[in-house]
Image (cartoon, rainbow, N blue to C red):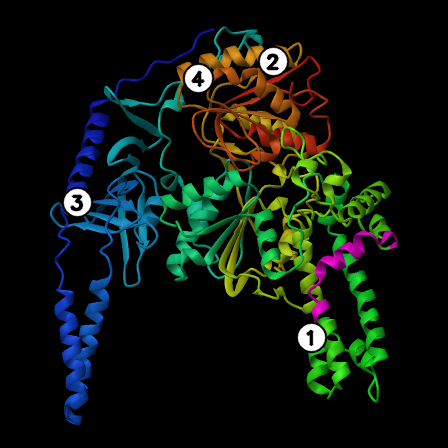
């Protein structure tokens, strides 16, 4: 076995091009840094002119007023224009793309960046990729192709002579990607990254030989992601600007990249501000990653929220008397019931019962007019019925008082949910309406769990409630759930509020609304969660939904289809835009992860843009032996590639903790809980639940046995999700009891 690590010698043409790009950068940076900041009219003088004109208008003759107002308008326009700070390109990374174009026999250099700039001295132009029409040439045409560019008053034709993605960091050009080739700047100058991917040599039987771990590619900066958008991805940024867009695709196909970059296009073309946009992601790790990507494209003020945190914060803002502590040990059966589509039907049945109870209360206070019959005859939400009756009928003082009490009860939705959770007869209807997903055992779990939650917590002095290590004496017992609320309750509280009042409006106002909402990894959202999120979009706003059904691993969700997902938000099926090319992982990992899905894989295998190291498979005797193998291999890998990010992804939390304890002496080994990734080089030990949407240079799956990954749909999807996090190489370990689809 050998590794081919020889780097090709750069041609004179390559060397000239790279030096030319460094020269361009130096000239442009010099122009930006020395741009005359004070080539402006003195604002003080403008203000004096405005004050003088205002005084003249007060005493001026009627015939002169037209001219005076005209001059005042000019001065105020100048004041507004010159009071704004001059926006110049960021000198640390002024642009990311370069084209040399030929039109009518003339050549011109065009650079793509986030801020437009004209270098008068050298004649170079940076165009804003969001606004400039010529940026479409960069994304739609390759080097050597002829293009057509349709402008409002003309059609321009030309040829792309040169097309390159430039990665600039701290004002230095460190990487160039051009025409399928990549170049990096090292201590000794430029070199090609066209190293042959690690392959095994030896002919017949080579597949059984030990595959090396490591590619050497992790020492170099990845290409600028914005420049890597392909023609199809770029077209989606500008598609359906006033309506919803559904982007689906396999792991590493760029769904999130498209969704986030679409925000920049929408802010420019729809003319709303980044702080009017909300991005909803499934866990904290994606919050950090999304914010990093958004910051790179100047969208620092976009709000990125974890889905569960959003529902909780809005519930607490709009409603009162919600328990402070969230339960950390909700039974799986209870969570499944609360997030299942059929639970909406249970809420509807409860609302019907509640309507009759309110009618019975009103009957007691009816005099000449049957308030109960009037209430039941109206086909609008209960709160609106009460308000309508109040405005149409003159009520007695006692009736007014009763109406006030009933309206106040409209906001006590926590009580309503507890009534449902403890109504076994009502819950039994779930078995039929859920197509037997909900079982009798789950219903019993929910009933008992709720019974413990509604018991009052007896808080004595702290020393009586805590053990010597500071932990609560109730931890791990049924007493621990007393007085708590489940995370799954928050969207249901908001849904109940909507059902009773007709709007998601609480005592402290309505649900916050945004001009644009992005739902990332939307396959993990429940029907009720999707419904509530639809209310967070303003009347003139729109939506981007991104996801992959093959990565739906949450055991509490039963994903149906993307058509159903949109319908839960009140949106007709607009058609899905599927991204079919995998850019993250090499062909070997794409093949492995596709085979893992087996009969649950999408119709066709994703296309792939590169080859790579084979998937490394290792059979271990037991878990402790696995730790020894990991320790020696990862120690060597981290010494060779100190900038590499490595994830050890386990199926169970207890397994992850054991592996962490046994390899943490390596250094730079972190145990990750609640998706609190640092995104620094080193080893992160974590679980499948926490890695949706993330990526790492190397991924290790140390427990690929039948116990952790049995032959059933959700287990296959979990292993698929874990394996597709790898950028360069995947290493799978198992005892001899390999899961059948990972052998």
Q: Residue at x 80, y 55 (%)?
A: 420
In the image, residue 166 lies at what x, y percent?
29, 36
Q: Which residue is mark 1?
A: 384
Q: Secondary structure at mark 4?
A: helix
Q: Secondary structure at mark 2?
A: helix
In the image, residue 742 lies at what x, y percent?
64, 21
Q: Earlier in the sequence, mark 3 or mark 1?
A: 3
Q: Earlier in the sequence, mark 3 or mark 2?
A: 3
Q: Earlier in the sequence, mark 4 or mark 3?
A: 3
- The residues bearing labels 4 and 2 have C-alpha atoms spaced at a distance of 18 Å
Q: Nearer the viewer, residue 94 or 382?
A: 382
Q: Earlier in the sequence, mark 1 or mark 2?
A: 1
Q: Is residue 485 among what the camera can see?
A: yes
Q: Which residue is mark 3?
A: 33
- The residues bearing labels 3 and 2 have C-alpha atoms spaced at a distance of 55 Å
Q: Which residue is mark 2?
A: 626
Q: Nearer the viewer, residue 144 or 675?
A: 675
- The residues bearing labels 3 and 1 have C-alpha atoms spaced at a distance of 62 Å
In the image, residue 592 lies at what x, y percent?
58, 25
Contact between marks 4 and 3 (CB within 8 A): the answer is: no
The image's mark for residue 638 is: 4
- The residues bearing labels 4 and 1 have C-alpha atoms spaced at a distance of 65 Å
Q: Residue at x 15, y 53 (%)?
A: 37
Task: Work out whether 410 lies above or below 606.
Answer: below
Q: Earlier in the sequence, mark 4 or mark 2?
A: 2
- The secondary structure that most of the magenta stretch takes on is helix
Give the crowd class for mark 4: few <14, some 14-19, many >=20 residues within 10 Å. many
- Region in magenta: 408-425
Task: Work out whether 13 lies above or below 376.
Answer: above
In the image, residue 285 lies at what x, y percent?
51, 38
Contact between marks 3 and 2 (CB within 8 A): the answer is: no
């Amino acid at each position: 076995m050998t590794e081919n690590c020889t780097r090709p010698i750069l041609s004179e043409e390559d060397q000239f091009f790279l030096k030319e790009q460094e020269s361009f950068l130096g000239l442009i940076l010099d122009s930006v840094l020395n741009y005359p900041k004070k080539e402006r009219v003195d604002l003080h003088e403008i203000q004096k002119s405005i004050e003088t004109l205002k005084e003249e208008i007060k005493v001026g003759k009627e015939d002169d007023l037209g001219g005076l107002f005209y001059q005042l308008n000019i001065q105020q326009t100048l004041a507004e224009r010159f009071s704004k700070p001059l926006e110049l390109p960021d000198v640390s990374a002024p642009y990311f793309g370069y084209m040399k174009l030929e039109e009518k026999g003339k050549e011109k250099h065009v650079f793509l960046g986030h801020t437009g700039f004209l270098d008068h001295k050298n004649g170079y132009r940076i165009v804003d990729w969001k606004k400039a029409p010529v940026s479409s040439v960069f994304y739609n045409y390759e080097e050597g192709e002829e293009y057509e560019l349709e402008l409002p008053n003309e059609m321009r034709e030309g040829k792309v002579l040169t097309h390159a993605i430039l990665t600039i960091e701290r004002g230095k050009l460190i990487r160039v990607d051009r025409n399928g080739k990549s170049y990096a700047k090292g201590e000794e100058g430029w070199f090609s990254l066209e190293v042959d991917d690690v392959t095994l040599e030896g002919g017949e039987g080579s597949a059984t030989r030990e595959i090396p771990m490591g590619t050497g590619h992790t020492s170099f900066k990845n290409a600028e992601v914005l420049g890597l958008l392909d023609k199809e991805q770029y077209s989606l940024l500008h598609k359906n600007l006033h309506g919803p867009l559904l982007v689906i695709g396999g792991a590493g196909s760029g769904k999130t990249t498209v969704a986030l970059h679409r925000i920049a296009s929408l802010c420019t073309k729809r003319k709303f501000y980044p702080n009017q946009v909300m991005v909803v992601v499934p866990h904290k790790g994606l919050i950090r990653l999304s914010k990093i990507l958004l910051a790179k494209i100047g969208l620092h003020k976009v709000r990125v929220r974890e889905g569960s945190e959003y529902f909780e914060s809005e519930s607490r803002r709009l409603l009162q008397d919600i328990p402070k502590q969230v339960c950390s040990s909700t039974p799986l059966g209870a969570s499944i019931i609360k997030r299942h589509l059929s639970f909406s039907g249970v809420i509807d049945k409860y609302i019907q019962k509640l309507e009759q109870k309110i009618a019975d209360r009103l009957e007691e206070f009816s005099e000449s007019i049957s308030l109960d019959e009037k209430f039941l005859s109206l086909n609008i939400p209960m709160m609106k019925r009460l308000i309508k009756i109040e405005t149409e009928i003159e009520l007695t003082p006692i009736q007014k008082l009763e109406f006030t009490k009933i309206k106040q009860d409209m906001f006590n939705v926590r009580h309503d949910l507890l009534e449902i959770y403890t109504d076994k007869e009502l819950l039994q209807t779930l078995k039929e309406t859920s197509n037997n997903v909900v079982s009798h055992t789950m219903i019993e779990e929910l009933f008992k769990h709720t019974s413990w939650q509604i018991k009052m917590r007896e808080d004595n002095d702290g020393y009586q409630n805590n053990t010597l290590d500071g932990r609560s004496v109730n931890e791990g017992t049924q007493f621990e759930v007393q007085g708590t609320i489940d995370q799954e309750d928050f969207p249901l509280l908001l849904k109940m509020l909507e059902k009773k009042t007709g709007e998601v409006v609480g005592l402290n106002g309505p649900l916050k609304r945004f001009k644009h909402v992005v739902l990332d990894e939307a396959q993990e959202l429940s029907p009720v969660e999707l419904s509530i999120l639809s209310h967070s979009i303003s009347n003139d706003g729109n939506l981007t939904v991104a996801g992959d059904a093959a990565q739906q691993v949450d055991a509490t969700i039963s994903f149906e289809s993307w058509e159903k997902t949109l319908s839960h938000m009140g949106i007709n099926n607009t058609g899905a835009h599927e991204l079919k090319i995998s850019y993250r992982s090499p062909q070997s990992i794409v093949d492995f992860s596709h085979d893992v899905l087996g009969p649950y894989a999408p119709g066709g295998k994703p296309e792939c843009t590169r080859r790579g190291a084979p998937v490394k498979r290792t059979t271990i005797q037991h878990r402790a032996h696995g730790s020894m193998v990991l320790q020696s291999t990862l120690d060597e890998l981290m010494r060779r590639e100190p900038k590499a990010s490595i994830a050890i992804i386990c199926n169970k939390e207890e397994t992850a903790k054991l592996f962490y304890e046994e390899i943490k002496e390596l250094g730079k080994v972190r145990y990750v809980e609640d998706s609190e990734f640092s995104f620094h080089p080193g080893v992160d030990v974590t679980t499948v639940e926490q890695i949706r949407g993330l990526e790492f240079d190397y991924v290790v799956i140390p427990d690929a046995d039948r116990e952790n990954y049995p032959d059933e749909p959700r287990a296959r999807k979990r292993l698929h999700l874990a394996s597709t996090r790898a950028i360069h190489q995947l290493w799978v370990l198992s005892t001899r009891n390999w899961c059948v689809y990972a052998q």
